[in-house]
Image (cartoon, grey):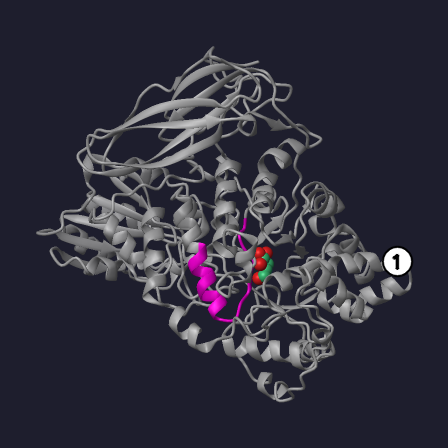
Amino acid sequence: MKNTIGIFVLCSISLVQGQHKKSMNTNATIDQKVEALLQQMTLEEKVGQMNQYNGFWEVTGPAPQSGDAQRKYEHLKKGWVGSMLTVRGTKEVRAVQKIAVEETRLGIPLIIGFDVIHGYKTISPIPLAEAASWDMEAIKRSAQMAADEASASGINWTFGPNVDIARDARWGRVMEGAGEDPFLGSCVATARVKGFQGETKADLAKANTLAACAKHFAGYGFVEAGKEYNTVDMGNATLFNTVLPPFEAAQKAGVRTFMNAFNILNGVPATGSTFLQRSLLKGKWGFDGFVVTDWASIREMMNHGFAQDGAEASQKAVTAGADMDMESHLYVKELVGLVNNGKVKESLIDDAVRRILRVKFELGLFDDPYRYCDPKREKQTVGSAAQKAIALDMAKKSIVLLKNENQLLPLPQSGKKIALIGALAADDNSPLGSWRIAADDHTAVSVVTGMQRYKGNTLVYAKGADLTVGKTTFIDELVFNTTDTSGFVEAIQVAQNSDIVVMVLGEHGFQTGEGRSRTQLDLPGVQQALLEAVYAVNPNIVLVLQNGRPLALPWAAEHIPAIVEAWHLGTTSGDAIASVLYGEYNPSGKLPMTFPRNVGQCPIYYNYHNTGRPANTDNNVFWSHYSDVDKSPQWPFGFGLSYTQFTYSKPLMKKNVYSKGESIEVEVTVTNTGSRAGVEIVQLYLQDIAASLSRPVKELKGFERIELQSGASKTVTFTLNDSSLGFYDNEGTYHVEPGFFNVFIGTNSQEVKAVQFELR
Ligand code: NOJ
């Protein structure tokens, strides 16, 4: 996969130039240093800082043209490259950094970006799964762990977190965000930014943190019909109240970079959107980091019909506020000419370069450009036992128990014959999920291996059927139309001779992620047929799902007694799953995205607006529904069971009338009425009953993760304030309006108890 040819030849010249250092006042502030450096730069060198190239081996977008690699080396040596992506490893990063620092006139170090989305070498659960933990400390630790590993391997900038809110499970990238809710999404965005970058701005200068990147700005999660890269057309109510809040949360948490998006938003490509990048992000929100484009998204503005050639695309992108060109290769080609012919003001170039240099200074790259290139640290850190322990904790917390009839789970630890069925049960690659470029293939713990660690039962494995035909990689289209059912006979026999059957079914890790939209949300291939064939001989089935998006599995939901949502959990997947199946870990995850009954219900989400005809009161057809399926989802947002049970008191408020600006407290007492300790995620939803704009039927405004021993109770107090009560109007202005509000508290978005108050 990797080809390092060429790097070392090019590194043999080691002239220490770094002119800027001679005039650098070490006591100056970062902004003064940036200004001093900017003054020394030629226009070509400035534009060079705005140019980012992919490395020389893996690609995460359309393949490069021929001659590309050679041109990149040449530009690197001229100082016309500000950043590289997907270069990894201390040796490789040092090699390219050395060219930038030692062979160019000013010696400005590169910022090295990488898609550290859910881990680097040690892979954490996919972000959607992590969001299911509702555990912000664990999510932060998982990001810290990834930052620790990636930074030890030469990288100093991650293209994460993805904070795209998504409501349509057909979109392959739902695996990469925190689900459908802007409040949960904002909390997760904050946790991930702090995990990658550290708690304070000063932490960015540590050698074990990464600059983070909030993406994709904005609206990408709303591609029409869930089809990848598709058009986005959305009203301002959704944009301001649903899509933008997690981005603003990331900005408030101090995220140093943003990535714009491939999609058009109401006719304007996000990459060319002055409204998004200049007015909102850099204007109203005061963001002083930089914006990188998505892969070739400047060039793609021509396909969108927004620019007729590369020059116009570059002009529009830079004017709109896109600071760094990822792989369009257009800024480096066009910007100098555009400035010289007066079409782009040099002040725009200066603004972009200031922002890029600022982040490089903050990272400490000018103090020591090789600070991320210590092979000893790389060896000690990458893939260490400590990293795996963090990934395992995260993986257990991400699992959601969807059904557990007659307490089939947890499994007895001894004396049983257990059949383990399904290609995914023995798969040690798929659980690594989609964004795992730096991980070694086949390094996940499979469910078979995880369960084998429990010796008390007899375990017999049968594959049943293959999941895919042909190769499964990050860039190849996968083939799932396998029709081979010849393995069913063995699976049926094994099931017949067992007390309990554990079936591991779902999607391959590479069936989700970028470029992997689906029109079906079923079990790919012949897995559904396998499930039904096994059920016919032994219905005592625990179905373990591995998938990167909500699936629609109505038959399984009705017939299978126990269902565990185990996503793509990363390196330690099988260990986490086994510990939940055997009851060593009591599951506590809650769905961050609604699971539909069928694909036709998509997009489906809990915080919808009421229609004028929300319910059938007269037993006729004139109400908002589908004629062929129940209106409710299969499993709602926030849903997840435990091996114990919790009861909720009625929510209590001290008063029923409050004034604007006042803190409003709501209390609820939760009791563990089951026989074992467990964790519950107590959820608070709010409804502004009548407002100047229609408000959703419910909006998550608080949650708390509590641990309770059997029989114990805890009173949880939520505090609501203006930031919980208001909403954005269609011009983007935030309002808190007087009137009546419903507060709902409960174990998921559907099972809640209500209390009402008035705001005056
Ligand atoms: C395209 C993806 O949309 C983006 O999220 C990613 O960071 C870049 N490729 C770089 O790999």
User: Considering the image in quadrants, where does the C terminus appear?
Assistant: top right
Q: Is residue 327 above or below residue 10?
A: above
Q: Residue at x 50, y 74 (%)?
A: 89
Q: Residue at x 91, y 63 (%)?
A: 341
Taking 241 as reference, is 744 left or right? left
Q: Is residue 80 above or below residue 662?
A: below
Taking 660 as reference, is 150 left or right? left
Magenta span has 150? yes
Q: In the depicted view, which residue is nearer to us: 677 or 471?
A: 677
Q: Is residue 580 above or below residue 728?
A: below
Q: Is residue 318 above or below residue 89?
A: above
Q: Residue furthest right?
A: 341
Q: Residues within 10 Å of mark 1 (few under 14, many from 20)?
A: some
Q: Residue at x 71, y 31 (%)?
A: 731
Magenta-drawn segment = 143-162
Q: Residue furthest top?
A: 618
Residue 214 position, x and y percent, is 58, 51
Residue 138 position, x and y percent, is 39, 49
Can residue 652 be seen in the rendering of this structure? yes
Taking 181 as reference, is 566 left or right? left
The amino acid pointed to by label 1 is Lys
Please name the residue that numbered disc 1 is placed on.
343
